[in-house]
Image (cartoon, grey):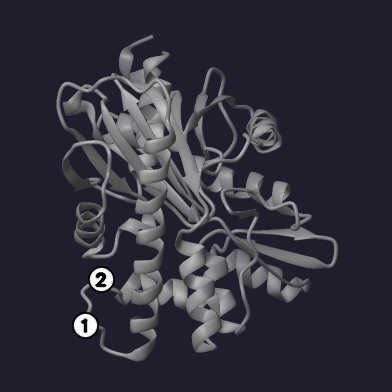
Amino acid sequence: MTDTNKSNLAIGLDVGTSRLVAARKTEQGFQYGTQLNAFLTVPFSRVTENALKKEGVPHTVEDSAIWIHGTDSQRFADLLNSEIRRPMRGGFLNSGEPDSIKVMSEIVKLVTGGGGKAGENVCFTVAAPPLGAEPSLTWHEATMKQVLADLGFQSRAINEGLAVVYSELVDCNFTGIGISCGGGLCNVCFAYLSVPMLSFSVPKAGDFIDASAAAVSGERANRIRILKEQAFNINGRQANQLLQVIDVYYDDMIRTLVAALIEGFHNAKNLPQLPRAIPLVLSGGTAAPKGFRERFEQILKESHFPIAVSEVRLAADPLTATAKGALMAALSEM
C-alpha cells in the first residue's frame, strides 16, 4: 500500500463541546469536515420528514420526533426561537441528555463521511481533567471508543492540548504550550519534545461567555454564540451594549485562564529545566475573534508567569488545529 493510500485511512477527530471537526490528508493537502455538536427535536410528520429530505437537512426519525442534528440545528433553533440541545457539556458527554450517545454517532457520521472502512483509524481528542481535580475521563473516553467501534473505526484517544502542540509546534520540535479554547473547556498542555509534561483544563470557555452574556442581556445563549462568532472583535470599543457585555466576559475568561496557567506551573513537579524560552500557541473557536491573542498576551505579560515564553501565537487555523494534530498522531502510527 502506498503512503497516500495509508494516509486516506487515517482521520483526526476533534471531539469538542461546540463542534466536531474531522481531518484527513489527501493528495491535495489537508481536508476538513465540521459540524455543530448540537441537535433539535421537532414533532414527527411525514410532510416535515419529506421537506427535510428534499432540502438535504441531516435528520433522524426517533419514535414521534425528528432529530435535526449538526450545523443545521442552529438555523432551525433560530427560526423556532428555541435553544439547541447539546450532546456534550463542559468537555464531556452530557449525562443529563439521554439521547447524547445516539446523536454523537450521527454527527460523527456526518463529519467523517459515514462508517469506517477496513483498516481506517481515528485518533480522537479528549479533554484533560480540570486543574486540581482527579482524572474522571474513563466513561467519556470508553463511550466515544464504543461509538467509533460501532461505526466500524479503530480508534485511540489523544489529549486535546497535545494535539495543538502536534499541529502547531513542528518548527519547535514539539516543545511548548498548546492551548485549545473551546466551548466547554480551555485545555492546556505543556510538552517537551512531544512528551506531555503537564496537562489540565479550565472550565471557563465559550459556553461560559454565552451563558453569562445571555443572563445579563436577556438574549438566548444560541443567539449570543452566533453573534460572537460572526460580528465580535476584542478591541475595547464595542458598537453596542450587547457586544460590550460579551467583551467583559471574554476578559473574565482570559484572566481565569492566565491565573490557572500560573497556578498549574507553580504547583507542577518534575518539570524539565528549559534551556530557552518556549512558544505558547492558542487555538479553538473561542480564540478565533480578532484581538484575542493580543488581549491574552497583554494579560500574560502583566502576570508573574514562572516560565519564559518566547512568543504567543495564534494557530494558523484555530478551528481546525486540534483535528489536524489528532490526524498527525494517527499518521505517525501508520
In the picture, measured across the screen, residue 7 lies left or right of residue 155, that is left
In the picture, measured across the screen, residue 155 lies left or right of residue 195, that is right
Find residue 164 and name its label: none
The amino acid beneath tag 2 is: Ile
Task: Assess whether mark 2 and mark 1 are in contact (beta carbons under 8 angstroms).
Answer: no
Q: Quadrant of the C terminus?
A: top left
**Residue 125's spot in the image, x, y percent?**
50, 36
In which image quadrant can residue 243 be found? Answer: bottom left
Inspect this view and state whether residue 106 appears: yes
Q: Residue furthest top?
A: 1
At 73% from the left edge and 66% from the top edge, which residue is drawn? 66
The amino acid beneath tag 1 is: Arg
- Callout 1: helix, strand or loop? loop
At 59% from the left edge and 27% from the top edge, which residue is drawn? 153
Find disc 1 in the rendering and name its residue: 237
The one nearer the camera, 111 or 127, is 127
> Height in image: 234 above or below 187?
below
- Callout 2: helix, strand or loop? loop
Find residue 234 and name its label: 2
Distance of mark 1 from mark 2, alpha carbons? 8 Å
Q: Residues within 10 Å of mark 1 (few under 14, many from 20)?
A: few
At 39% from the left edge and 86% from the top edge, which residue is drawn? 242
Q: Quadrant of the N terminus?
A: top left
> Height in image: 170 above or below 241?
above
At 51% from the left edge and 48% from the top edge, which residue is drawn? 16
Q: Residues within 10 Å of mark 2 (few under 14, many from 20)?
A: many
Marker count (numbered): 2
**Residue 7's spot in the image, x, y percent?**
37, 22
Inspect this view and state whether residue 24 appears: no
> Height in image: 196 above or below 284?
above
**Residue 171's spot in the image, x, y percent?**
16, 27
The one nearer the camera, 212 or 104, is 212
